[in-house]
């Protein structure tokens, strides 16, 4: 995990080589610090160039100019902030990502003094976070790169701000959050012949370097625990499954933890109920939930979060084979509940069922959130910008919604009603593993709900946002690392000791 951009902080007025970045609104007015940095000739140049280029200063637009004589810079980059209303709701990571893209591979000074907008240390750190995330690429398997790829592979930003020392301290904490997101992106982007269950478990064990206690449950232990649902999903693959439990004990000793559970289907062929060939290559990302949990534990441990958190991931491959589980099989889960298999491609909920049971019984968490690329139905309902949220606890659901609003990882609460639960009743077992096509995301959530017992719980269906999601200013990668920032914010705002 390496940075692709160097970010430092300095005082307003600091000179240096490279590009100079300033910000203007739709009124084309510069802040005082920007005018000082440009000098009179530079400020006049911006006004004249904007008129000539019909640059309106719209939010996330830019104008690149040769630096005027007398200005200590190679180029002048003018970034638009939009109207006064736009400036009242700036997405700081998005602004940082957009700006970083405009000076990719170059050295630049950014005058983070915005007209009519307060940009304190927290905003500066969020700006830097966006720059780091936008600079991420996953090209480790390319032996030949485009001619300009090397030029854009690394850049250096110096962010000039009023309280640069405080901003630097805030940004150091934000850097560890970026590392967690990047770790999750790397895991999602890796090919399944490289990242098989045993290898995924080894990468999770790297968290021990940060003080996380990591326990890897191998197949013999899974059989001993009675994880019949998870083991059934794995039995068609030559790659044996793992369950990894990661414990960060940053809070008071003995205090119940918050639990994060991740679906980790390393590759999902659909099993005997095999998927269509078109798009099957995307099923290497069916472990986006597990990746988010590992990334979140990295972020929390790196910043020494003052909370007890347990992360648990079920890691399997779902493959067709003579030994695969089949439609009409009846499985006995760790909870003792029996499951009639209707479709072997409804496998993620089987994995989650056993991992959730294990964590509820062994850890007795105060709250539990599972993340899973679970259903195509949630993409039909919400598209690829919003995750679906199902919960048995209004207070927990509101905390998650609020965290998502702050981080930009939006969730939308979906209904859980008795009719959905009834749809998974089976003639032959306690339940079926699918309730049919209609309301597919909701019936899947109802299935998981049968395993959470009395724990406050939320299920995040991240099928639309974790992989091949809508590109934005902080992510141009196929794997988004979605959920790491949300989980970190959830802990920060609601569960850390003050």
Image: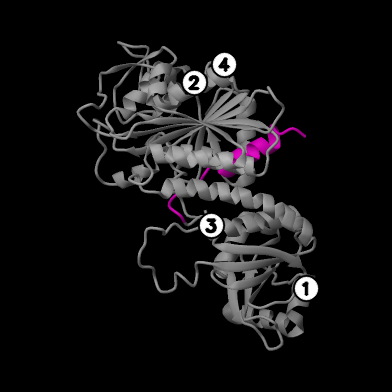
Which residue sits furthest bottom?
69
**Mark carried by residue 358:** 2
Q: CA distance from mark 2 to mark 3?
A: 35 Å
Q: How many marks?
A: 4
Label 3: state its secondary structure.
loop
Q: Is residue 129 left or right of residue 71?
A: left
| Residue 324 percent coordinates (x, y) | 25, 27
Which residue sits furthest left?
322
Q: Depth check: 400 or 257 in front?
A: 257
Q: Which residues are magenta?
A: 477-498
| Residue 465 percent coordinates (x, y) | 47, 44
Provide the residue designation for mark 3: 2
Label 1: state its secondary structure.
loop
Q: Residues within 10 Å of mark 4 (few under 14, many from 20)?
A: few
Q: Depth check: 128 or 114 in front?
A: 128
Q: Is residue 175 visible?
A: yes
Q: Residues within 10 Å of mark 1 (few under 14, many from 20)?
A: some
Residue at 41% x, 16% y: name it: 422
In the image, is residue 448 above or below residue 211?
Answer: above
Provide the residue designation for mark 1: 13
Q: Nearer the viewer, mark 3 or mark 4?
A: 3
| Residue 457 percent coordinates (x, y) | 56, 25
Q: CA distance from mark 1 to mark 2?
A: 57 Å
Q: Nearer the viewer, mark 1 or mark 2?
A: 2
Q: CA distance from mark 1 to mark 3?
A: 30 Å
Q: Nearer the viewer, mark 2 or mark 3?
A: 3
**Mark carried by residue 454:** 4
Name which quarter of the figure residue 162 lies in. bottom right
């Amino acid at each position: 995990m390496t940075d692709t951009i160097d970010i430092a902080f300095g005082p307003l007025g600091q000179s240096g080589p490279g590009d100079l970045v300033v910000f203007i609104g739709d009124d084309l007015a510069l802040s005082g610090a920007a005018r000082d940095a440009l000098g009179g000739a530079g400020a006049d140049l911006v006004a004249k160039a904007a008129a000539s280029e019909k640059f309106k200063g719209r939010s996330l637009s830019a104008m690149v100019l040769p630096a005027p004589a007398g200005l200590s810079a190679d180029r002048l980059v003018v970034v638009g902030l939009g109207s006064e209303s736009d400036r009242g709701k700036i997405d700081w990571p998005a602004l940082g990502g957009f700006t970083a893209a405009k000076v990719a591979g170059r050295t630049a000074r950014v005058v983070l003094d915005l007209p009519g907008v307060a940009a304190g240390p927290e905003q500066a750190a969020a700006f830097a976070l966006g720059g780091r995330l936008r600079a991420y690429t996953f090209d480790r398997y390319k032996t030949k790169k485009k001619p300009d790829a090397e030029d854009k592979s690394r850049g250096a930003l110096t962010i000039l701000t009023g309280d640069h020392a405080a901003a630097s301290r805030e940004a150091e904490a934000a850097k560890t959050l970026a590392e967690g997101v990047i770790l999750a992106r790397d895991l999602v982007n890796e090919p399944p012949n490289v990242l098989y269950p045993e290898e995924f478990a080894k990468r999770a064990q790297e968290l021990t370097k940060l003080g996380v206690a990591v326990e890897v449950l191998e197949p013999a232990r899974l059989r001993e625990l009675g994880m019949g649902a998870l083991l059934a999903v794995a039995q068609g693959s030559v790659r044996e499954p793992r369950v990894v439990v990661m414990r960060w004990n940053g809070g008071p000793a003995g205090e119940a933890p918050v639990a994060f559970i991740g679906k980790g289907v390393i590759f999902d062929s659909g099993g005997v109920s095999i998927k269509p060939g078109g798009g099957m290559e995307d099923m290497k990302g069916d472990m986006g939930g597990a990746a988010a949990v590992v990334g979140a534990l990295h972020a929390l441990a790196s910043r020494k979060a003052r909370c007890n958190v347990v992360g648990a991931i079920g890691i399997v491959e779902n493959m067709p084979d003579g030994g695969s589980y089949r439609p009409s099989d009846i499985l006995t889960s760790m909870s003792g509940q029996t499951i009639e298999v209707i479709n072997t491609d409804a496998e993620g909920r089987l994995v989650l069922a056993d991992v959730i049971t294990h964590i509820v019984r062994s850890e007795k968490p105060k709250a539990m959130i599972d993340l899973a690329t679970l259903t195509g139905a949630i993409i039909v309902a919400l598209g690829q910008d919003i995750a679906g949220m199902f919960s048995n606890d209004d207070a927990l659901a509101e905390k998650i919604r609020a965290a998502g609003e702050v981080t930009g990882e939006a969730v939308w609460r979906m209904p859980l009603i008795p009719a959905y639960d009834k749809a998974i009743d089976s003639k032959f077992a306690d339940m079926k593993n699918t309730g049919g096509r209609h309301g597919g995301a909701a019936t899947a959530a109802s299935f998981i709900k049968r395993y959470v017992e009395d724990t406050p719980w939320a299920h995040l269906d991240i099928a639309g946002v974790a992989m091949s999601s809508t590109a934005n200013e902080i992510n141009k990668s196929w794997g988004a690392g979605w959920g790491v920032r949300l989980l970190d914010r959830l802990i920060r705002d609601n569960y850390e000791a003050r």
